[in-house]
Image (cartoon, grey):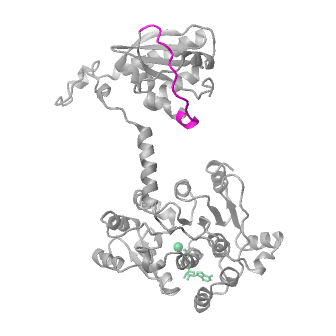
Amino acid sequence: MSTAKAAPWVAVSERSSSLSPAPERRPAEGPNERGRRGSRAWRGAGWREPFGCVEAVAGGCGQPPLCFAVRSDLVGAVVGRGGSKIREIQSTTNTKIQIIKGDPKAEVKIFGNKPMQTKAKTMIDNFIKEQENYSPQYRVDIVAFQPSVGRDVSTNHNEDLPLINWDKIREDALKWGKKKWADLPPIRKNFYVESATTRAMSQLQVDNWRKENYNITCDDLKNGEKRPIPNPTCKFEDAFQCYPEVMENIKRAGFQKPTPIQSQAWPVVLQGIDLIGVAQTGTGKTLSYLMPGFIHLNSQPVAGGKRNGPGMLVLTPTRELALQVEAECSKYSYKSLRSVCIYGGGDRNGQIQNVSKGVDIIIATPGRLNDLQMNNFVCLKSVTYLVLDEADKMLDMGFEPQITKILLDVRPDRQTIMTSATWPCAVRRLAQSYLKEPMIVYVGSLDLVVSLFFITIYGI
Ligand SMILES: Nc1ncnc2c1ncn2[C@@H]1O[C@H](COP(=O)(O)OP(=O)(O)O)[C@@H](O)[C@H]1O
Ligand SMILES: [Mg+2]
């Protein structure tokens, strides 16, 4: 592997001999490893990059390096957090910089052409000056007013800290993740049978129908090759012809036809694809995820009784919304699926008892669910269908930390649906974190915000 084309980096190495340290090769590494090692080296991991490579990538090949010494305790000020400062110096001056750690002084070598070497040195001097101005040793006046117990300003304790082995931590996290999710039954996700009428729709009919239904816009946010966006299901039978019990419930409710979001969301969700549904309040988003969710739950290889926990989890921002969703759940009760509502301000003991009786669907506000989860009253490992309902409101109410903690316990290969009435940046970020290769259905006009999202988040 050629090291000459490495991404910009800086070697902070231990000094083995003061003048001409012998080059010493590291074992071959993958590209990811290479990208990471710069930051690992800041704290003197004890490796050295071949000098020849450094010279080859810096401008001014053949020019001897500009060498000078810097007090070891000031090296951090030159390198910056995560290497930010040194990278800045290198990129603005087109030089490569090597710092060889030593005690009490480190040796700095700047590779590049002469004017740029000088410029880089000036920048380094400035950073050092800045640091000295703020250093406790030089700000006796400030230190005098600090409580001095346990503080020794004359020594640099950073040198004594053990190095953090990030590679090991990452490896362990991967291993732990694999172990955590091992032994779980596979998830069945695709239950969609396209009706003959839906299949027969021409592109023009599809476009017209979407336009007439409040301008439905959809896109596949998967990177690479795009999947076909399914035609909308214009009638209830088009989505649920194979599920008579669902059809009965809909008939009983007396609904005439699917709402726009339902018509486009159902064929996506029934195929097992993650969905972001953006539509105004009151447009029927609840049934757009509940109906496919019922079918999903009832079609898993492990039956409800043996699942040992809920199969569907709906997170909602408020108690009122949680109760509304629960009411819809009960109204369209399917195959006697049991749902439980968990929300802050409600009877905690009663909720714990309800959950422990066995449950298929949990509808919860994030705070209270996180509380029960942390206290081991509810196990979320069995959840295969997750809904983040009214995501914009949940974020407005500051529930992101609880959502993050809850989702640590939900298997990553679940199907996830997210609904929202608005589409601000924070919601887009949430979608990017928790949905996998989703499709988006947007009822309304495809405005600039959405276009920007496609470009910035998914690079399309
Ligand atoms: N296809 C439909 N036709 C008529 N009414 C519907 C339909 N789907 C749902 N509804 C009703 O519309 C109301 C609002 O739906 P909801 O799902 O709460 O909206 P949202 O979640 O988008 O704010 C509910 O009372 C629901 O029963
Ligand atoms: Mg809703």
Q: Could one spot residue 389 in this view of the protein?
A: no
Rendering quarter of residue 372: bottom left
Report the magenta stretch's main SS: loop
Could you tell whether 317 is left or right of 5 in the image?
left
- 369 to 143, vertically: above or below: below
- 332 to 260, vertically: above or below: below
Rendering quarter of residue 117: top right
Where residue 427 appears, x then y in whole percent? 53, 58
Q: Is residue 75 magenta?
A: no
Where residue 348 appears, x then y in whole percent? 30, 74
Q: Could one spot residue 453 in this view of the protein?
A: yes
Which residues, given as a range, are shown in magenta?
18-33
Where residue 332 appears, x then y in whole percent? 53, 86
Q: Is residue 30 magenta?
A: yes
Write down which quadrant ligand 1 falls in.
bottom right
How many labels sit on residues?
A: 0
Quick one: 148 or 434, which is closer to the camera? 434
Residue found farthest to the left: 149
Quick one: 266 or 146, which is closer to the camera? 266
Where residue 267 appears, x then y in whole percent? 67, 73
Quick one: 129 or 302, which is closer to the camera? 302
Residue at 46% of width from left, 31% of height from top? 39
